[in-house]
Amino acid sequence: MDWGLKNRLSRIIQPEDNRVIMLAVDHGYFLGPISGLEEPQKTIVPLMPHADALMLTRGLLRNCIPPDSNTPIVLRMSGATSIERDILPDEGLTVSLEDAVRLNVAAITLSIFVGTEHERQTLEALSELVDFGEEYGIPVLAVTAVGRELGKKDARYLSLACRIAAEQGAHFVKTYFCDDFEKVTSSAMVPIVIAGGRKCETEMDVFEMVYEALEQGAAGCDMGRNIFQNPHPLAMIQSVRAIVHGNAKPKEALEMYNELKVEKVAAV
Ligand code: 5RP
């Protein structure tokens, strides 16, 4: 791996423990103003000091994120679909590579849809980003398995999709947690981060998922809704961070969450 690419990647996956907590706020690219991100700046900016990186679109970046911020940016490069049409896998690249450089991003990302009729176009787009990333020293994050179309997301499917992404040259891969997750991480060749998925019923469910994923070889998480849709997002991100970087157990994270949410309420 070339120096520049390694340097950018180490701004995201922290070299001290090889772990990462990213805040994913790119959902609007196909979901519009989803709950929690109606006024993105109000939600995102206070959370940024607790995230190792921010995953988002260029529109959100330019409109809502202060340009003097130091949080590394993972820029979504794919899209051109919406929830209105129910064919989410039909994505293409929507951002020029020059614009990613102009925005001084730490990594670029896109979704791939292995096993759908759009598999080929999304894997070719991944290859295009990897060619560019290798040339200019920008790591590529492949996102696998988003959307209802894919049905069951089990270890067999997720290890297939993650390994294919790594074989195409992705430098790290984002996927969902599942039973036998170690099968996914151990065969992926590159770091795996988990998405949070739909909002879980309880905070403890989130903490247990993150803890288990790390125990089974994940490098961390790239979490969105389970942080920004929580009634106490600031308490939530700090508690997830304590698991990722502080080796906190789920029970300790819950205690932390309960303390922080009270402090926040008291401060208002
Ligand atoms: C959508 C994405 C999202 O960033 C991803 O789903 C993570 O967010 P969440 O934790 O809410 O699932 O890549 O394509």
Image (tube, rainbow, N blue to C red):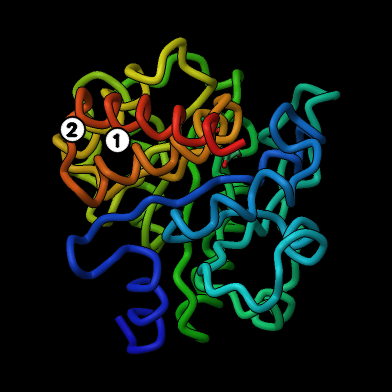
Mark 1 = which residue? 159
- Give the crowd class for mark 1: few <14, some 14-19, many >=20 residues within 10 Å: many
Along the viewing direction, whichever of 58 and 207 lies nearer the viewer: 207
Q: In this image, 99 relative to 223: left or right?
A: right
Q: In this image, 110 relative to 193: left or right?
A: right
Q: In this image, 27 relative to 24: left or right?
A: right
Q: Residue furthest top?
A: 201
Q: Quadrant of residue 176?
A: top left
Q: Amino acid at mark 2?
A: Lys
Cβ(mark 1) to ligand 1 < 8 Å? no
- Give the crowd class for mark 2: few <14, some 14-19, many >=20 residues within 10 Å: some
Q: Say if 47 sits above or below 68 in the image.
A: above
Mark 2 = which residue? 183
Residue, x 84% and y 24% (percent of image)? Answer: 85
Residue, x 55% and y 62% (percent of image)? Answer: 74
Residue, x 60% and y 20% (percent of image)? Answer: 149
Q: Amino acid at mark 1?
A: Ser
Specify which label sits upstream in the sequence, 2 or 1. Answer: 1
Along the viewing direction, whichever of 112 and 44 lies nearer the viewer: 44
Residue 173 visible within the image: yes
Secondary structure of the residue carrying tag 1 is: helix
Residue 156 visible within the image: no
